[in-house]
Image: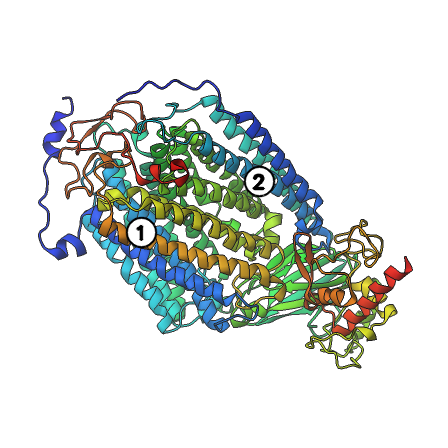
Amino acid sequence: MARSVKPKSNLGPNFWPVTALLGVLSLVNAWTIVRVPSMTFLPQAGAPATDVDFIFRFLGISGGAIFIYVTGYLVYFGIAFRHRENQPIDTIGVQVHDNPRLELWWTILPTLLVIVLGYFSVDVWWKLQNQQGDVLTVESIGYQFGFQYRYPKIKDPVPTLYLPVGTPVTLHTSVAANGVSHGFWMPEMRIKADMVPGLINTIRFTPTVIGDYRVICTEYCGTGHGAMKGEMHVVSQQEFGKWFAAAQAGKDYTPPLAGAKPGSDGQHPAPGNGNDASGTAVALDSGKTDAGQVLFGQKCSTCHGVGPYEQKIVGPGLGKLFNDAAHPKLVNGKDVSPANIAMLLKNGYQGEAGVMPSAQVNAISNVDIANLTAYLVSLSKKS
Amino acid sequence: MAVAAPHAVLDHIHPEPKSFVAKYIFSIDHKIIGVQYLIVGLLFFIISGLLAELIRVQLLVPSGAIMTPDKYNQVYSVHGSGMVWLVIIPLVTGGFGNFVMPLMIGARDVAFPWLNLASFWMFPPAGMLLFGSFLVGAPDAGWTEYPPISLQGPPGTNLWCIAIFLIGISSTLTGINFLVTILKMRAPGMTFTRMPLFVWAQLATAGLSMVATTALAGALLALFLERVFGVPFYDPARGGSPLLWQHMFWFYSHPAVYIMILPAFGIISEVLPTFSRKPIFGYKMIAFSSIAIALLGFMVWAHHMFTSGMAPWLQLPFMIITMVIAVPTGVKIFGWMATLWGGSIRFTAACLFAIGFICVFTFGGVTGFFLASVPVDLHEHGSYFVVAHIHYVLFGGSVFGIFSGIYYWWPKITGRMMNERWGQWHFWMTFVSFNVTFLPMHWLGLMGMPRRVAVYDPQFQFWNVVASLASFVLAGSTLIFLYNMWWSLRHGRKAGANPWGARTLEWMISSPPPYYNYKKIPAVLATPYDFGNPLPYIGMEHAPGAHATPQPVASHKMPAKRRA
């Protein structure tokens, strides 16, 4: 039964072209990860975010290449070395047992990759440890099911996290008396710490982009865990100063730059035309261009500019929405019309082109949508 | 013959039990016990799988479709606990380990058959306790049951403690049993480097189960004592430490990841040579990498706790060692790929699942590397990214390995062939729907969706609906698999001793194997994987058809395009 098989001297038909093709695919993967803005999935709003995303991208590029090569070769070997119908049933493969040189290389190469990735990880870890903090120190207290914050020189804990832009923050996490563990995740900052009873965990970060962000509980804490979210508002230094002074005096002050939940705290103009947060109809006629402009600066300018489509930040520039022949449709494929823009603002979008948050996530009311739409329409008229 | 003398002792055969109970219920035959593990494990797989479908139905709408958060928390906790402790670990060690390993090393049974019986009979009660806990309020703090929240959990949490404690004891005893069996009961001439790779994998796994599971048992005992008698181990308000549980739990549960995956590695290392008609490439590297993974696996547990609160400098060694595990794992993956290279590959269902395993497991390994990096983990810990990762390595890894193993050894276990065409359907449906179910979960995590939530923000709905719909297809593909087994038992073609033309010892005897396995214990002359050479076994009676040439299986003639 011992059959002599003619040993194959080459690596197989088309081995090198396939290898080259997989290389090209890996490069496409790398290019996509580096160049497509939505590959970060969330905007970056603070100091560790850029570094964390750097490692993430590096891992995506190198890990992606490994996956592409493994899968590509599996498919290729499967096709090239399949048992064919016309071959005898007892056909055997090349009786090769090992190849010490090859095995040495495929041990050395992953080791090198581990060293490089380990180096980058340690480097960013080092940055995290030495992240500037202490300009502002805040204590975050987790309870079932929400977060409170203790600021120095403010008597009582406050329910919302306000942070001045550009200020290094040291945040200590703790748990209310007799509480259970929670997680404190600021996805836009790319950092979290668990809140463990009896322990104080510390994270340092610097918010760099004014806006409204989420704080999310990531450690199971009971029935309400899924709904345990908090608001974090990064505001200008001046607004923070005003808020801080008011809080010290025991007064309520919501900085206008922080988009507090509409309808819940009376900070937004009372809707005069029956619109509220829960309503679905948006009365577009009532939109005010100047209010929209202010709102655009707060809510949209992180990702969008007012230039032409090509001037991308995260998403495209919105200055020529109505008169851009190269881009006649909205991102969701609908025609450009005030109503469709309003719907896009309301529902958000998610797809190949990236993610546009919904009104709920952006914390904008129907009145805000009307104002923003009016502003966007006005932009196109100017240009 | 040089080995004549030991045979005089080894040839004594105990009589087969006569009564039904001694033969099939309280059997001490490793093969029957293996089949018992497989049957009960698959039953628990169906139950835990149905719980998974409940999870996916719930997450069809952001506010939760069918359950209160309380119920939902119980469902995913029992789903996770069940899949880990009652499905994957018992199937890959108790099931395949019991049935296949003694046959592979030319033994008549395991070293301690009565211990084996005891191990098995802790398994069904553990399952009944865990699933029965729904009657009194099931555990609801996830499969990790972190205190202090688990101290306040429903009464069923106590049953959970007992159930996992039982299955832990069972696992430890099986580990001892297998370790002694492999070290002491190999056929003459089967040196370590002539052992099939599945045996190497079981050896590494046995060592892991034996050492690691004791830590879990201690942690569970303490949790039980605290919940029932108020002994303050974990409650910080009374001087306990929540981190104590985390350390003890992960000191077990990280090695447990390798308890779940190493036997699957072993299955792949048997299936690929057989269906590519080639020796495994780099035998020694694959064998030793199992041991390396098992040893390193003990030194990385705290990478689950980067966010929990540990001295920051301590994060570094755990990160580095975790990353180093990628090297032996990569060596295995490259070895499998090189085994396919130059082969004469037959794409049976077993082979397809083995190849699918490599593809999907590589992806899970890459995302594991993401999570090993401390800065990335500080971002992604506790999010759906982790849920996606764990399912890529445990479903795409372990469960694909289990599917491959069942297709591969089914003819040996039952004496009948499964339907190849349905096997192919099962693979492709599973492969596609698996990826569509779990790939989007990476994106959900990156977009900020935390795990273990009964409700979620509306912007996450689209991908949740995609994952849910695909998971229903995944469940459907499993139905095909179950039907295939049932069909095979009734109508399957007789398999003969060696339908795949494999060369390991278990295929040299009839299917199903006789009570005593080997009438004469064989002597082993070489590694099992040299397809060009005569079989390396002497001094045994080969069953008819045990010669190492594959019989034509349905799949070889199956694709319609060849007839056209």
Q: Gap between marks 2 and 1, in whole Å?
A: 37 Å
User: Which residue position holds label 1?
Assistant: B484
* Circle 1 SS class: helix
Image x and y of residue B505, in percent: 24, 34
Compare residues A162 and A268 and report the one nearer the observer: A268
Q: Which mark is residue A63?
A: 2
Whether discs 2 and 1 lie on one chain: the answer is no
Looking at the rendered structure, the kind of residue marked 1 is Asn
- The residue depicted at 35 percent of the width and 64 percent of the height is B130
| Residue B148, visible in the rendered structure | no
| Residue B370, visible in the rendered structure | yes
Query: Which quadrant would residue A58 be assigned to in this image?
Result: top right
Compare residues B161 and A313 and report the one nearer the observer: A313
Left or right: residue A177 versus residue B215 is right
Q: In which quadrant is the C terminus of chain A drawn?
A: bottom right
- The residue depicted at 66 percent of the width and 53 percent of the height is A41
